[in-house]
Amino acid sequence: MFNRVVNYFDNLYSPIALAKDRQPPMGLKAFVLYFVGQFRGAFILRFILVSIGSVADALMPVFVGLVVGMLATTNPGEIFDQHGQTLLWMVFVVVLVRPTAFLLDTLIRNHGIVPNLVDLIRWQSHWHVIRQSWTFFQNDFAGRIANKIIQAGEAVEIGVNLTIDAAWYALVFVVVAIVVLAQLDPVLLVPIGVWLLLYAILFTITMPLIARYSETLSEAKSVMTGRIVDSYTNIQTLKTFATGGHEDKYVSDSVMDHVIEFRKLMRVFTYMWSILFLLNAGLVVSVTWLALTGWNQGMLSAAAVATAIPFALQIMNMSGWILEIGSNIFRQVGTTKDSMDTIAQPLTMLDAPEARPLAVTAGELAYDRVSFNYWRGKQGSVIDDFSLTVRGGEKIGLVGRSGSGKSTLVNLALRMFDVQDGAIRIDGHDVRGVTQESLRAAIGLVSQDTSLLHRSVRENLKYGRHDATDEEMFRAAEQANVHDVIMGLSDPQGRKGYDAHVGERGVKLSGGQRQRVAIARVLLKNAPILVLDEATSALDSEVEAAIQEQLTRLMQGKTVIAIAHRLSTIAAMDRLVVLEKGRIVEEGTHAQLLASGGHYAMLWERQSGGFLDLEAIH
């Protein structure tokens, strides 16, 4: 029975739902309400239940006073006869009302809200951030971005729930206390009023400081996390260059920055608590003194004294609890603001409102007077007034020294960046007018920087075509001459073959093995447009020769753009296009370009062992 009740609350909300408006807003209040509003019903119910619980707690000093009054005015043996009904009402509140309110609140908070809200914030934040442009990720640490998404979920949930648990609870409690004490003797409100004023001043001064320092601390933590994760991600570089001391300092500097900000925050806490201890001592002493003086003068009954002093003690205990929770709330406010600045950034690479899926017919790819620069406003373009048409089914090779713009042209076609002038069209459709997902589904890319997901080989191979059968996957792996390698894989968890995990970025495989898996992945994807960006650069000549026939078969019937420094790998293309500083300087077949004795012929002559001596070209 109890498990069924808990399961009901567990499933009140889905942690992987998406909001109608997929763009989290900027501004702290709007950002928090964006997520909290999706749990509106649960939070309204929490306000009601916490109010009931707070009133019940505020009645406890009243009950103590009533019992003391009964003892002072009732003869032994008559208390239940004279006050039985009142005592039953007390029992009803203590045994039924208070536990029921807090139990329901616990179920809603701990099962309906906490796990679902925390992970819903993370999921929706990730859903939004993963759709940011490539530039967004190039300009930041992956670890820093991940830290901001992870911490945002807990920060919003803790901040909002603690506000209800503490601020709302305390407000209701203090209102009840003021009403009760005012009826006993308005003089008792004087010390409470003075205390509330000084407490509010303390709260007003310290909480913004805590929020500000927490925001700075959160950023310092994100930087520290980013540097640590960056070290792990590039562990091979760290090991091979033996830069342990330098790397230690790089990370330790961020640790020290974090500690410095942490100390500033802790200093505020120390000052805050020191002042609160003095305020609370003054409150308890003054209320007790006034209550005893009133009783001594015959103005207050023993029941009133027994009510007033517990109220003062409860307020004292509550004040420390509220201040601690309040400081925690404002720490979460600072953390939320820090996360918001990253998470709520508007998307810059959007599908056009009228964008439709790309339907590739012939597969013609046309660059029409394209210009592009990575650094807007600065002189000199990576691509400058570039025009090139690759006919459907044509295979061209792009040739040029590093920095001539070859890979940039590929990234522009994939719409990793938008052109600044001109247009890129596939079968006459501007790539900015079709959906990004359909555009990238139409292009198969094998790049020199092969990155595999830290998942199974099976998941990596099927990533571009999830509905592929295992038989199709095996055939693609065999064509890429990597099936036998895969069958020999195993990981620390005992998974073998196609189920073995390849490590972060495929670190458990050699560069050549990763490249062959990437080729198999594109073979399986079978997209109508194929881009080979140094696709065989990590392969030795024997392996390259073994899969060259399969690559040739892969290229049949497809539009192909191949980039290679090893010119022998693209010499058989239908057409070679030679680039220099983002412009075409020559184009033609291999034989034509050699016969012309121009730029390509110089490159060919300077090959050493089939590789391009780029530094010798001026």
Image (cartoon, rainbow, N blue to C red):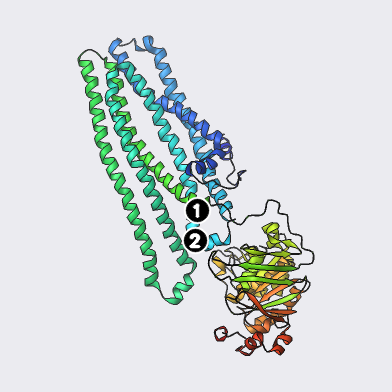
Asked whether, in this view, residue 180 is left or right of residue 131, the answer is: left
* Image coords of residue 410 (percent x, y): 65, 69
Quarter of the picture holding the C terminus: bottom right
* Image coords of residue 490 (percent x, y): 58, 69
Say if 142 sits above or below 35 in the image.
Answer: below
**Disc 1: which residue:** 342
- Whether residue 483 can be seen here: yes
Amino acid type indicated by mark 1:
Thr
Numbered badge on residue 331: none
* Image coords of residue 370 (percent x, y): 66, 67
Front residue (pair 190, 540) = 190
Amino acid type indicated by mark 2:
Asp
**Disc 2: which residue:** 140
Crowdedness near tag 2: few (<14), some (14–19) or many (≥20) residues, C-alpha within 10 Å: few
Quarter of the picture holding the N terminus: top right
Residue at mark 1 to residue at mark 2: CA–CA distance: 10 Å
Residue appearing at x 59%, y 80% in the figure: 401
* Image coords of residue 249 (percent x, y): 36, 67
Cβ–Cβ under 8 Å for marks 1 and 2: yes
- Whether residue 419 can be seen here: no
